[in-house]
Image (spheres, rainbow, N blue to C red):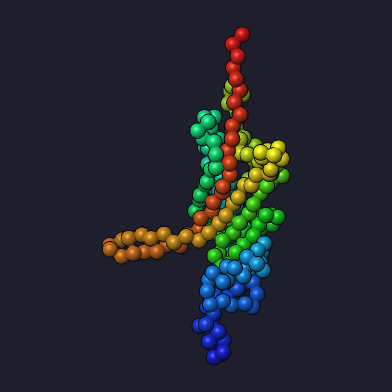
Amino acid sequence: MPAHKSNTFRNKPFPCYLCNCSYSLKSSLSSHEKKKHNENRLVPHFQYFSHISEGIINHFRAAFLQDVDSKLSFHRTTEGIKRFQWKFPESLFYFLFSSEPGFSYKPSIRRYYCIFKGKSGYKQIGIIFTCEVWGRKQNKLGSESFVLVKERNNNGMCIEKEIVFTWRKKTIKKVKDEKSLYILCGILECILEVRRKTVEIVDI
């Protein structure tokens, strides 16, 4: 490495992988990304991703559908924000979501986002996971539990709700024979909101 480049790296060890800027503090790099690359879709290292088999994709689809279904309950205490987590590789997130309009990537923290909004977002998730009714469940009495896609605010305006998928790198510490082992893995997360509609039974 040439001397001038070596000195630059020591003084500014946090480079932006999307342009030629470098910073002395990681917080400065994060601010730069937010201002200049806030909706970045480019993943500079995507060509190094390993192949994702159909088996892994189907495994994640099944895990997602099963876990969401388990939270669609008919008791009022089960309403609210739900958070799901799975251990899956970075390349799976890229494969499933990189072509979606709500996809973005932040290189400084190596974190991915994909945001789906409203009815159209709900429908698109159904296409990705090959299940149109992935976020609804009905019981025999007609009561329904569902993933919320829109609601009215205090002013009566209809607000589209977000369903958010993220991926981040995580280090897991394991201790064996008094030695610490650090294992890198990826956490794929989904955040959504669940509501319910009840049906009153009237005795005649």
Residue 124 place in picture, x, y as percent: 69, 46
Residue 68 place in picture, x, y as percent: 55, 40
Q: Is residue 182 left or right of residue 72?
A: left
User: Is residue 84 in view?
Assistant: yes
Q: Is residue 183 above or below residue 77?
A: below
Q: In the displayed image of the protein, which residue is found farthest to the top?
A: 204
Q: In which quarter of the image is the N terminus?
A: bottom right
Instruction: Give the camera-side residue of 105 and 29.
Output: 29
Q: Which residue is drawn at the image coordinates 71% and 40% (left, top)?
A: 157
Residue 154 place in picture, x, y as percent: 66, 38
In the figure, residue 146 lies in which quadrant? top right
Residue 87 place in picture, x, y as percent: 49, 53
Q: Is residue 121 left or right of residue 78?
A: right
In the figure, residue 178 lies in which quadrant? bottom left
Q: Which residue is drawn at the image coordinates 58% and 41% (left, top)?
A: 193
Instruction: Give the camera-side residue of 115 and 45.
Output: 115
In the figure, residue 35 lies in which quadrant? bottom right
User: Is residue 47 in view?
Assistant: no
